Image: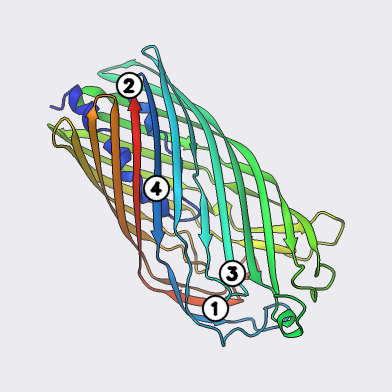
Amino acid sequence: MASRRFSKGITSLVLLSSLASPSFAGGLERGGYNIDQLFDTSPFTFQSGVTYVTPQRRLKDVRDTDTSIFSGGGNLNSRPNTADDTSNYTIPYIGFKAGFGDAIDCLVDYSEPFGGHNDPGVNWAGANNNIETEIKTRNYGGTCSYRFDVGPGQLRFIGGAFYQEVEGFKERLVSTLPLLLGTGTGVGRLDIDDSGWGWRAGLAYEIPEYAMRASLVYNSRVNYDNLTGTVDLRQVPIVPLYGGQVTPVSGSAEAPDSLELKLQSGIAPDWLAFGSVKWTNWSVLQSVAFCPTNGLPCPAGGLTSLDLLYQDGWTISGGVGHKFNDQWAGAVSLTWDRGTSQGYGAQTDSWTLGLGAAFTPTEHIEWRVAGAVGVLTSGSSGAVTQNGVTFGDDVSYSFGNDLVAALSTSLKIKF
């Protein structure tokens, strides 16, 4: 039988071992939503951490399939047919948890749950599709729980809200003609930002003496109904009506809702098994069109658009943790994530092995370090038709099995 001391010693490794793995899941997943700090048994905890991710997705066999000067950017097939598509990035986290009596716990935290950065550059055959695209989010959350005795353990009701900000940009080669005429670079740029509110609700059941916990948490969608920004075509003066100027635009989108089941239990003295299953509603992000707000007409499909065409994501993870002594503990996990691309884009399945360690020099301080290495599986991208509209007919490419790695560290202070 596991003891309460066992429970306090290594249940935190469930978070530790998963810190790096979800940071390169499908869709625009980065840090995701994580409220594990809410379950810490100390009255007050402060935690700060950062994850560094290095995805190595490389595109090959790139072919410009729309060589029209005006709609397709011109013939780019003389440019390199390979490109490094992904950039390294960091994910910060800060959280403060407080307990109020024996029943109520609250957590306030800052995280960056979603994002993406593709930076193949201008010197490749697919520059008419993308030069650089980046999306960032900032999430400010507050979550509380109320627990009470039920049977051999405690039932916990969870609820909270969060405020989320999003911003991003995309650059692509609209036409090569301005370069030939000496009137501009031919590159157009979209900039956008917005904010919105979301909420979460869930249940958890815990039996501390067995280090057992089961939790089910739902995170709502965040509506970006006022996604506003600009389309800058000053470097593409040849575009009729919109060229040579900055046009204000607006659109709408949603950050996906998700449902996650987490399980953990002591399986032997100083040993813990854990697992999770998460569904993320990435299919809410298809093609996000942006139309002018200054009175100019909106072309079919928008003046420009962000074409994602995602399917829902599934993430399944499992692992074991072990407490070596009063100061050191470790964990290992394996994660599978279903890709969200459906013939367009490079978001394929991934497999990730995660390793983590925790060092507790005193009862008030815990330092964690975790790493992960994974495989982004192979695939291809090209033209697809959805609801009678064709996407991806400007460029096609393939990609092999690529590596991704991550390293994370965090410090928790308990008092």
Left or right of residue 393: residue 90: left
Q: Amino acid at mark 1?
A: Trp
Q: Which residue is label 4 attached to?
A: 51
Q: Earlier in the sequence, mark 3 or mark 1?
A: 1
Residue 314 screen position, x and y as percent: 41, 51
Residue 395 screen position, x and y as percent: 57, 77
Image point (28%, 17%), residue name: 151
The residues tagged by marks 3 and 1 sit, at their Cα atoms, a distance apart of 9 Å
The residues tagged by marks 4 and 3 sit, at their Cα atoms, a distance apart of 26 Å
Q: Earlier in the sequence, mark 4 or mark 1?
A: 4
The secondary structure type at the circle numbered 4 is strand
Q: Which residue is label 3 attached to?
A: 131
The residues tagged by marks 2 and 4 sit, at their Cα atoms, a distance apart of 24 Å
Q: Amino acid at mark 2?
A: Ser
Q: Which residue is label 2 attached to?
A: 42
Q: Check contact, mark 3 vs mark 2: CB within 8 A.
A: no
Left or right of residue 14: residue 163: right
Q: Which quarter of the figure has residue 18? A: top left
Image point (54%, 82%), residue name: 63
The secondary structure type at the circle numbered 2 is loop
The secondary structure type at the circle numbered 3 is loop
Q: Which residue is label 1 attached to?
A: 124
Q: Which quadrant of the rendered structure holds the N terminus? A: top left
Q: Earlier in the sequence, mark 4 or mark 3?
A: 4
The residues tagged by marks 1 and 2 sit, at their Cα atoms, a distance apart of 54 Å
Q: Earlier in the sequence, mark 2 or mark 4?
A: 2
The residues tagged by marks 3 and 2 sit, at their Cα atoms, a distance apart of 48 Å
Around disc 2, counting alpha carbons within 10 Å, would you say few (fewer than 14), some (14 to 19), or many (20 or more)?
some
Q: Which mark is residue 378?
A: none
Residue 61 screen position, x and y as percent: 47, 81
The correct choice, above or below, for 75 with respect to 320 in the image is below
